[in-house]
Image (tube, helix red, strand yellow):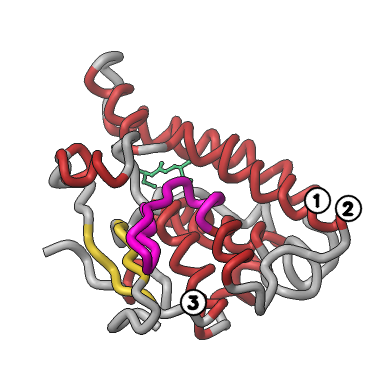
Amino acid sequence: MNGAAASGYVLHDYFRSSASYRVRIALNLKGVAYRRHDVSLVKGDQRSPQHLARNAQGFVPALELPDGRMLGQSLAIIEWLESAHPAPALYPADPFARARAMERALLIACDIHPLNNLRVLRYLGSALGAEQAARDDWYRHWVAEGFAALEQMAGDARFLGGEAPGIADVCLVPQMFNARRLELDVTPYPRLVAIDSVMAAIDAVAAAHPDRVQPAA
Ligand SMILES: N[C@@H](CCC(=O)N[C@@H](CS)C(=O)NCC(=O)O)C(=O)O
């Protein structure tokens, strides 16, 4: 799946970017072939003219379609993939279930993740003088607050969005990876941990893990 791009898709991403990780999971779950192109966030490649031409925000991911068109914003990319490659579906067919899956995905993608973006963490340090330890506390604080609410919302289904992996689970896995990387105690969120484990056991999901993709040289 993560090899030569039979379908001609190119994912411009960074191995540890959680928004990129979402898109890799979605591509893999759908069995869509793609080629990765590394944009190193630590080297600042995201601000190069070449990358700004792909994504005016200077963000990864950017998905280059087989016809050369470019798409940014991970959730927009995944929604497009759902239209172009409908099976397996990552969104429930029932309108309320679909909206509820999005409610959970957006909790992560809009209310947790942007507060902990690299540029925000760098601004806390460079403009506000926050030390690394304070920045790590900031990071953990916003994940903990979001996860506490999501744990309440998670219900008893196998996945966040129901009985099949979907958009909310695609967002959960990278956020859980980040939470653990920042050494957040995740034991207060047993449902989220359980759902993440079920996701991690799916080959297509495991193949998208940052440790399994080639970091930028
Ligand atoms: N809402 C965007 C967020 C993308 C985003 O925040 N990407 C991060 C990596 S996870 C990034 O490129 N950061 C670069 C920077 O902060 O300089 C999406 O879902 O695609």
Q: Residue at x 59, y 73 (%)?
A: 85
Is-magenta flag for residue 110? no
Quadrant containing ligand 1: top left
- Pick whichever of labels 2 and 3 is earlier in the sequence: 3
Can you give x and y, in whole percent of width and height, for residue 176 in the image? 53, 57
In this rendering, would 49 be left or right of 13? left
Looking at the image, residue 190 sits to the left or right of residue 153; the answer is left
Q: Nearer the viewer, residue 65 or 27?
A: 65
Q: Earlier in the sequence, mark 3 or mark 1?
A: 3
Q: Which element type, helix, strand or loop, lies under badge 2?
A: helix
Q: Are marks 2 and 1 in contact (CB under 8 Å)?
A: yes
For this orientation, the residue located farthest to the front is: 67
Q: Position of residue 53 (x, y in %)?
A: 25, 42
Per the rendered image, the range of residues in magenta is 62-77
Quadrant in which residue 18 is drawn: bottom left
* SS for callout 3: helix
- Give the alpha-carbon distance from disc 2 to disc 3, as whole Å: 26 Å
Q: Where 209 falls versus 113 (above or below)?
A: below
**Image quadrant where one finds the N terminus:** bottom left
Label 3: how many Cα within 10 Å (few below 14, some 14–19, many 20+): some
Helix, strand or loop at label 1? It is helix
Q: Residue 129 versus residue 1: which sits nearer the camera?
A: 1
Question: What's under tag 2, amino acid-wise?
Answer: Phe
Check disc 3 and give the amino acid type.
Asn
> Which mark is on residue 96?
2
- The residue wearing badge 3 is 28
Which residue is label 1 attached to?
100
The reply to whether discs 2 and 3 touch (Cβ–Cβ < 8 Å) is no
Q: Residues within 10 Å of mark 2 (few under 14, many from 20)?
A: few
